[in-house]
Structure formats: structure tokens, C-alpha cells
Amino acid sequence: MGFLAAGLKKMLAYILEGQVRGALEQPVHTCGKHNGTFCFVKTPGSASTMLTLNNTSSQPPTFLLTGIPGLRAAQVWISIPFCLLYGIALFGNSMILLVILHEHSLHEPMYYFLSMLSVTDLSLSLCTLSTTLGVLWFDAREINLNACIAQMFFLHGFTFMESGVLLAMAFDRFVAICDPLRYTTILTNARIAQIGITVLVRNVAVMLPVVLFVKRLSFCRSLVLSHSYCYHVDLIQLSCTDNRINSILGLFALFSTTGFDCPCILFSYVLIIRSVLSIASSDERQKAFNTCISHISAVAIFYIPLISLSLVHRYGHSAPAFVHTIMANVFLLIPPVLNPIIYSVKTKQIQKAIIKFYLRSKVRCHQ
């Protein structure tokens, strides 16, 4: 009898233990969906127990992208001009790259830098293509934290890279006009490659800390982003932890890239204008200025939307939400769309090379 009683006692204890474990597991499973928050678990025969859940022990949060705020019903129609702009950007920059690659007369420093600009514009367009059209066409709004951080890294990285390439192109124009006799000896292929690698390394160096510190944040507020892509400022504002270091790193990345490049570009053009005005012949002055028009236009369509967007974010709090979103998309799409058009229209060598490439392709099709 004693043996039977002991066995029943052990069985009863096992059943009770299983009930307690089940009661614990259910609330913990439910609370595991919340990152970096406190959950209270009520266990049988005991007081409430507070559990702190770390962000690293749960699934990465899922964010919701936003199309055009207030115009959700018309998003399918709004997607048509967006799709057209993406198509122009991809086709135009691909054409510039193919023409420079196949036309040996364009294998010069100026066109090498132009090919870098086209690669950057192409990459910048591809960064936001899938999420923007996904939101507008299919209302596919969900994106997890890891994918969001990856998009943010490439989006800001290629934006900063475009600024660096524009600075390199300004240096190219400065040497060509102010020191033409040493142009080929200064801008050798090796030096052009070094400039390109320097721009790339600089962008990776400033963006890596930004990404790593975003990864450390916990998110427990509303996870709705205000754009159709992941934007650094937009992302860190949703954090429920201290994000001051993230703001500082973001500002450092901005000022060490575009904040440095823009004054350098302006200074280079001050020197270029001074050099051009010292030329006696008016025809030579006109010719020198014409070589800079395409680059000046590229600088303007990159920095003017950037500055305008910054001013709207800073002072346009009373503006409708869709104004912020449309301006942000314009900032990302206008340079990739207009740069190939500007260089095709303003640069005769590019025009001739495109016509030659088209005729050559047409002949091959008929053979």
C-alpha cells in the first residue's frame, strides 16, 4: 500500500508540474511578440511574475511601409507615373553604361566618372523599386527589421556615393579647365580607380556604425513607417529606447559626405569660373563653360531636392503628410531619371555614340 501511495503521489506531482509549466509557457509565448517590453505572468498559487524580454530573444519586428498618405484609393493610378519614372531611370542609365563600354572613343576620365554616376543612379533606383511598386500595386506593406536595415544601408550608401561621384566629376572639370596640359597625367586610369574605391570605402565606413547601432534598438511603439522604403530618421523615431547616439551617427554620416562634398564642389567652380574669365577669347570661354553645363545640372538636381526635403522635414510640420512622401520619392527618382537625359542632350560625344550604337545594333539584327 505504501508503494502504491508513493506512486500516486509522484503521478499527481507530475500532473501539477505540467499544468504550471503550461500556464507559464502560454503567456510567455504571447508576450514574446513584444520586443523589449515587460510582461506579467500569473502562475497558479503564486503572485504575478514580471518577465523582461530582450529584443534578441524574439523574432525581429515587422514594419509597415506607407504609400501616399491620404491617397490610398488612388495608389494604383499613382503607380503609373512612378513605374514610368523607374523605367526611364533603368533604361537611360543602362544605355549610358553600354555606350561607354562599347565606344572606345569614350574611354576617357570624364566618361569613366559618368559611368560611375550611372552605376550609382541605377543602384539607387533598384534600392526602392521593389518596395515602392509593391506598396502601390499590391499593397504589400510588410517588411522585417533585417530587410529594412539592409535597404536603409544601400539607400543611404548610394545617395552618399552619388555625392562623392559628383565631387570627383567636379575635380575632373577643374583639372580639364585650370590645368589642361597635365590632364592626362593627373587623371590616369589608376588614379580614377583609386578615387572610385575611396568613395566606396568612405560610404561603407560611415554607414556601418549607423547600421550596427540601429540593430541594437528595441521597437515597441507603432511600427508604421512614413515612406515606401526604410529611411534612417523614420526608423529610429519608432524606437522605444534611447536613440540619441543613432541621431548623432546619422548627422555625422550626412555631414562627412554630402556636407563635405557640396562646399568642395562650390569651391572648385569658383576656381573654374575665375580661370575661365581670365581667357581672352570669348569663344574659348563659351566652350569651357559648355563642358561644365551637364555637371552643373547634375549637381543642381541632386542637391536642390535634398536641401528642399531637409527644409520640409524641419519646418513643414503643418504640410500634409503626402507632401513629405512625394518630395522624398522625387528626391530619390529625379537624379536617376534626369542625369542620362541631360548628358545625352548636352554632350555631343554621347549623342554620337548612342546613334552609332543604335545603328550598329540595327545592322546586327538584319544580318
Image: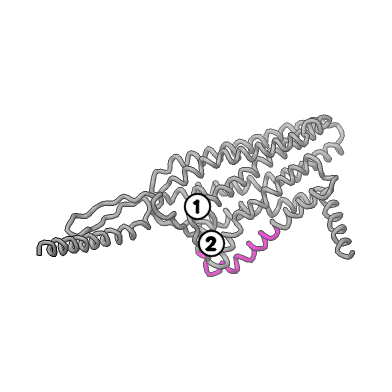
The kind of residue on which mark 2 rests is Gly
Give the residues drawn in magenta, as a range.
70-88
| Nearest to the observer: residue 133 or residue 173 | 133
Instruction: Locate residue 60, reporting x and y percent.
Output: 44, 54
Instruction: Locate residue 338, reporting x and y percent.
Output: 70, 53
Instruction: Locate residue 13, reporting x and y percent.
Output: 18, 60
Image: 26 above or below 274: below
Image: 176 above or below 71: above
Residue at horizontal 10%, vertical 62%?
A: 2
**For this view, does 307 lie left or right of residue 359?**
left
- In the picture of the structure, the residue carrying the numbered disc 1 is 146
Report helix, strand or loop for mark 2: loop
| Nearest to the observer: residue 282 or residue 158 | 158
Q: Nearer the viewer, mark 1 or mark 2?
A: 1
Residue at horizontal 82%, vertical 45%?
A: 106
**Of the image marks 1 and 2, the number of the one nearer the N terminus:** 2
**For this view, does 182 lie left or right of residue 338?**
right
Instruction: Locate residue 247, reporting x and y percent.
Output: 47, 42
- In the picture of the structure, the residue carrying the numbered disc 2 is 67
Q: CA distance from mark 1 to mark 2?
A: 20 Å
Q: Quadrant of the N terminus?
A: bottom left
The kind of residue on which mark 1 rests is Asn
